[in-house]
Image: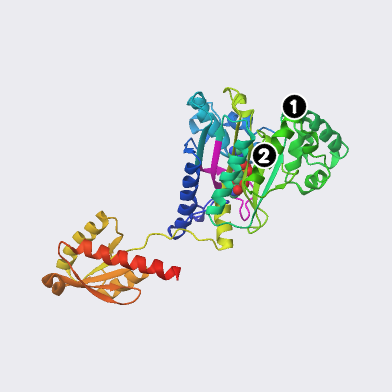
Amino acid sequence: MALITQKPKGTQDVKPEEAYKWHTVEKLAADTAESYGFKEIRFPTFENTKLFNRSVGDTTDVVQKEMYSVTAKSAANGKDPDDFTLRPEGTAGAARAVIENGMLNDALPQKVYYVISCFRHEKPQAGRLREFHQFGAEMYGSALPSADADMIAMAKTYICRLGIKDVELNINSIGCPKCRAEYHKELKNYFEGRKDELCGTCRERLEKNPMRILDCKSPICQDIAKDAPIILDYLCEECSDHFEKLKKMLKAMSIEYTVNPKIVRGLDYYTKTVFEFVSTHIGAQGTICGGGRYDGLIEELGGNSVPALGFAMGLERLIMTMENEGCDFEQPKRCSLYIAAMDDSALEKTVVMVKKLRDEGFWAEYDLAGRGLKAQMKYANKIGAEFALVLGSNEIESGKAMLKDMETGEQTEISLGDKFIDNFSNIAVAKMFSNVLEDMT
Ligand code: HAM
């Protein structure tokens, strides 16, 4: 029985009282992306497995070890032979969607963003989940280094708007297929000498894609990779020039960075620029953002030859960083008014008043549990109502009631007639402003 009340390993529930943190990061993501001219795109949670094999790459950890691939029950009967996979990331699905919808035939660059759930069968730990969420952004159609700088600037703007301070930007260039051919040869030579010490997966990678050994999670492979040749020493003129121009632009925008030649990223589609933002506040899984250029992917997937680039950030890691740095989240809406009804005729008036308040956008509440007056006021307090009002036969007869400020205990007489909503609204707004002023002083 316990199994059905336990969430799957590596997943998280967001309780209602924590949801405002998610609203903060999601709202600011949309806001920032839109101010950089990105429009939201939505695409399926699962895609044909081949899409990920082709784009993420079939020698990557993600494809070899971490994908959740699913087959419909009917497929077992031979009715539906398709093999689907829950998206481990967003770049592949977004690229498939822009190609399929002909978006790359419009004026370029095309700029899209998404906020999605992703699935990877990794070993769960703090900041590493099996279902996690990404805010990602992709730009199609610019080969210029200024596009790389623009993308990094947007990621940085978002991180700053969240209030995160302690973050480091690491950049690198992993070249293009031209310069990588030479580099692969050198890498192969290097690892060949210690082939027997590599893990089984990396021994296979040595033949197909030696660069993947550089981000293997096995500690032994990591140790061997420490002194491996670095790609920056093998860049062709075009890639080197692209990287120099990017660095210049970042400097011009006062965006601090470190060139880290060890960053190769764990996905195969990257070319030229790669980058990561790392937080020092959330432990070993500190990479809050990863991205880079992927000029060959669109063509690889069957589209035109269109250069592209992007990034994605883990929302769980961003929220953890914000919590650990003490950043502000946008506070959730509060209950404005609790109306406590003393008897059935008061309840009839209460439901009408509450409906009118809600129609005007206020969060208003009344008793739905058959509580007595004392218990109703206790409940109003518990849910954090800003004001409360008691309705009994006296109040209904006189058309007036005392509005109680639940924080100060102060009572103000308020008319229950036609002007009730206006009068209440004025009092609530005045209180909101006085709270804001108090916070500022
Ligand atoms: P990625 O580096 O695999 O890149 O993931 C991007 C971010 O997602 C990471 O920096 C991290 O914050 C978060 N993340 C990844 N795996 C997990 C996990 N298991 N648990 C929690 N958070 C995680 C990509 O996914 C690329 N698609 C980024 C990109 C977009 N490149 C170009 N465009």
Q: What is the residue that sits farthest to the front in this orientation?
A: 252
- Say whether residue 86 is visible: no
Residue 124 picture location, percent across and down? 62, 51
| Amino acid at the residue labelled 2 | Leu
Q: Is mark 2 within 8 Å of ligand 1?
A: no
What SS does tag 1 mark? Answer: helix
- Say whether residue 333 is visible: yes
13 on left or right of 409 = right
Looking at the image, residue 119 lies above or below residue 398: above
Quarter of the figure that contains the C terminus: bottom left
Which residue has dot 2 on it?
A: 246
Residue 338 vs residue 306, the one in the foreground? 306
Residue 131 picture location, percent across and down? 55, 47
What SS does tag 2 mark? Answer: helix
Residue 158 picture location, percent across and down? 54, 49
Which residue has dot 1 on it?
A: 178
The part of the chain drawn in magenta is 115-138
Point 51% across, 56% down: residue: 2
Q: Give the CA distance from mark 2 to mark 1.
A: 20 Å
Residue 128 vs residue 246, the one in the foreground? 246
Q: Quadrant of residue 171?
A: top right
Residue 129 lies in the magenta stretch: yes
Point 58% across, 22% down: residue: 302
Residue 221 picture location, percent across and down? 79, 44
Nearer to us of marks 2 and 1 is 2
| Amino acid at the residue labelled 1 | Lys
